[in-house]
Amino acid sequence: MSKKVDIVKNSSDFINKDDVHEKMHDKNLWNARVKRDKIAAEIPEWEELRNIASQIKEHSLSHLDYYLDMFEKNATKRGAIVHWARDAAEHNQIVYSILQDKRITEVIKSKSMLQEECGMVPFLEDRGIIVTESDLGERIQQLDHQAPAHIVMPAIEKTTEDIAALFARTIGTDPNDTDPHSLTEAMRNNARERFLRAGAGMTGANFAIAETGSFVVCTNEGNADIGASLPPLHIASIGIEKILPKVEDLGIFIRLLSRSALGTVATQYTSHFSGPRKGGELHIILTDNGRSKRLGMKDFWHSLKCIRCGACMNTCPVYRRSGGLAYQATYSGPIGIILDPTFDARRYSELPFHSTLCGSCSEVCPVKIDIADQIYKWREIMAEKKYLPIERRLAFSAAGKVFAHPPLFRTAEIMAEKVLPVIPDFVMYNKMINPWGRSRTMPVFAKETFREWYLKNRKKEETNE
Amino acid sequence: MSSTKEYILASIKKNTPTGKHPYPAIPAFPKSNKPILEEFKENLEAAAGLWYEIDNPSEAETRIKQLHPEAKVICSATSEIEGNKDINKITDPHDTADVDVGIIRASFGVSETGMVWIREQDLVVNALGFLSQHLIILLKPEELVRDMYEAYTRVELEKDNYGCFMLGPSATADIGAVMVRGAQGARSLTVFFM
Amino acid sequence: MKVGLFIPCYIDAIYPEVGIATLELLEKLGVDVGFPLTQTCCGQPMSNEGDNKSAREAEMLFVDNFKNFDYIVCPAGSCTKQVRVHYDKLEQNEDVKHVRENTYELVEFLHDILKVKSFPETQFPYKIAIHNSCSSIRGLGIAKPSEIMGKPFNKTANLLNMVAGIQIVELDRPDECCGFGGTFCVTDEAVSAKMGKDKVSDYIANGAEYVVSPDMSCLMHQQGIALKNGIIRLPFIHVAQVLNGGPYKTQEA
């Protein structure tokens, strides 16, 4: 059985690491949220756009077999070769077979959360294929042997100094050079050779259009386009939930995507692939990997509407203080909390509790996923599955009994240190530590409760109670 | 292969959510009333793109020399400007790797964002748009649409195998959240209205 | 109109002055208020953890205690939200439905039901920061969440602006969660404490002399953080205390 992710410890480590990382992380992501608010406010129909986008997604997802079939037919007609993969293993095997078939040993790839989810890079590397991430943030993480920490800003946990040290170690830059411009330049030059050498370019897709068999890839660096326009082979991994019915839907979604993600009007490159380029070959791998099963989960299928903008992560006060790596999962932050347990409920059983349920994620989501409600529902599932730590389970069950019986409650209240909701001792199921008092001064119990005051000052006047 | 497809489609069918989820009616949203060309220029500038109003091809060539005095290899996919590397002779996209300035005609621009629409036939060799160190985009000032809704009624994905909305030069903020232009693609993008 | 006063357990035991202020304020406004003596807890701490089985009995008792009132008023957003939103797990008989539909948080009751237009006798000549809890904003809608586009509104601010002399300061992150989150504050101590510290820093940076909130539970956490960090001159008080002109007895350590 997989080991439970200890999100509490991981995030605490992130905060206590030093006085720099968490502070910078929180600040940079909050700035993204502020930029998002500002640019969303410029569109009078913003809230209506969210509604429409949500409805289009719900429509597509509830007619998914129909639109997928249409997509495949149209893409095939245009000359793309369409594959289907039911899970990560099949996806990776298909990629490997295509590469083997053409004796390709070096690949350049752009960001794809699906390929990340499938563990494709280590799979290919184990088989002797050199895979280079071309998105700068992804490449930084790859060089540091880390997973992306954020779905849009993979290296957001690192300071410029961290990256300068990493580049000095791995690509030979001057260790004293901490200028983001020259560091970016160094990577541009380093990556260029790899682009030129690669036998295949791999991408994901942000959207797939059923009526034309097209798919759309959004980047700011142009790295997906280099990868798709240079090597003779382009392989795109597309999650089956990415389907939109019509080209005109893109008018809605492109308006929402980058504004929500980074607070910019659009990504620098919004690229539409509808067939292989002149002299090139295009393979599309439509991948399920748990999505069709999720579609049948009454409380959770709305999570399939996600367009991977990362707005919920930027706004999440808990994520900003925890760092994405703390979640030890492909997806972190609020969207991660509701997606990860669908892959492994036990491993990710603590994630739904790593939230204050403040609800900001649901309000910021451009496709109106009820993220906070789903987090709450995952808590219920974890409680039912008895994945809660035993101490916590006993404490709440005891509290439930006390609250149901007024005389018991009175006694408990009088002996205030024994049982009171929310107040330290009640939740101090582990008597060895005092998680309230370490960071906060203890509240002082009043000499006279409100109830006692009421009995003295009001009760005698009342005739009926 | 087909069995996996059947498996997935059957699984989708079995799990399809109940309830009605009709395709929504999309209303005609209000349009910005700024002068369209001004709005385009503003948004292009916000994305670090430059622009010039150009009267004729020779003015364009002078301007290119002025903008990129160091440029050795200039490759044009347009009929108006020649350059010194013939795009039509390129058979392998890797041959665009030495291009300092690539010149492309966009079929239209979007004023809401400052994007230009560039198709495979505009690029001749797709890689020209991404390996060139700098880009000059020719655009007729009257070829502008207001927003992304209009833009998507104008594109022809059913015909073009490749098309890209390009917005200013390549960018990244992956190091220290500092905006850097010229990440992997073009270092600069200049629109010539002509 | 017969109003049942629901005083959450932590207000009863730690902040009785908030209960007193709420009761006096409602009485001043001419409301007939009753206080069922067998009330305990709304069930939130258990239910929050997904443990609905443990919450159930407390919830049934709550319904029984309050089913005969026209309105149930509570000076706490998250407890109100618990009743209104999370009692959906109970069998929806007439009593449960009545209680769910008619339980109001104090600010919304004053603002939307009583439609109070002035607090003529009160004054509060200080700079205050408002903290609306997440349950109050996103669960009950007492203010426009900053994520949502459109015309801003803030019912707490509307009420407080009726008090003479008050000056409301703007915060850098006006509705950022303070990290209380019920049991979260002890199960996820490090993150919760960091969020609380950032919140308190925001008040101080913007010159607040008082922090005023419709939710004492968030304030208990924030005040605990402030005191632990040596910030002793920033009182955290409930909106009822300001609107009622007291009592201001706070928990001096």
Image: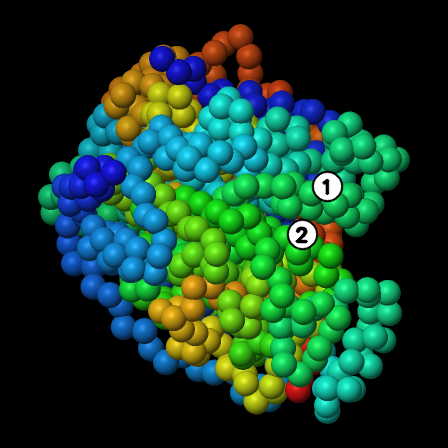
Q: Badge 2 local density, few (<14 within 10 Å), some, or many (20+)?
A: many
Who's the residue at 43% across and 51% down the image? Answer: A281
Could you say which is closer to the camera, residue A194 or residue B170? Answer: A194
Who's the residue at 67% across and 52% down the image? Answer: B184
In this picture, residue B112 sits left or right of residue B53: left
Q: Chain of mark 2?
A: B
Q: Quadrant of the N terminus of chain C?
A: bottom left
Q: Which residue is mark 1?
A: A190
Q: Chain of mark 1?
A: A
Residue type, mark 1 in image: Asn
In this picture, residue A174 sits left or right of residue B137: right
Respond whether the residues carrying marks 1 and 2 are from the same subunit.
no
Q: Quadrant of the C terminus of chain C?
A: top right
Q: Position of residue B131 (x, y in %)?
A: 66, 57
Residue type, mark 2 in image: Gln
Kind of element beneath mark 2? loop
Q: Position of residue B194 (x, y in %)?
A: 66, 87
Q: How is the image coloured?
A: rainbow
Who's the residue at 31% across and 37% down the image? Answer: A85
Instruction: Give the spatial CA distance, label 1 vs label 2.
Output: 10 Å
Who's the residue at 35% across and 69% down the image? Answer: B158
In the figure, C192 relative to B15: above or below?
Answer: above
Residue A275: image quadrant is bottom left
Residue B156: image quadrant is bottom left
Is residue C125 visible in the rendered structure shown here?
Answer: no
In this picture, residue A408 sits left or right of residue A435: left
Residue C44: image quadrant is top left
Labelled pair 1, 2 in contact (Cβ < 8 Å): no
Q: Which residue is mark 2?
A: B184
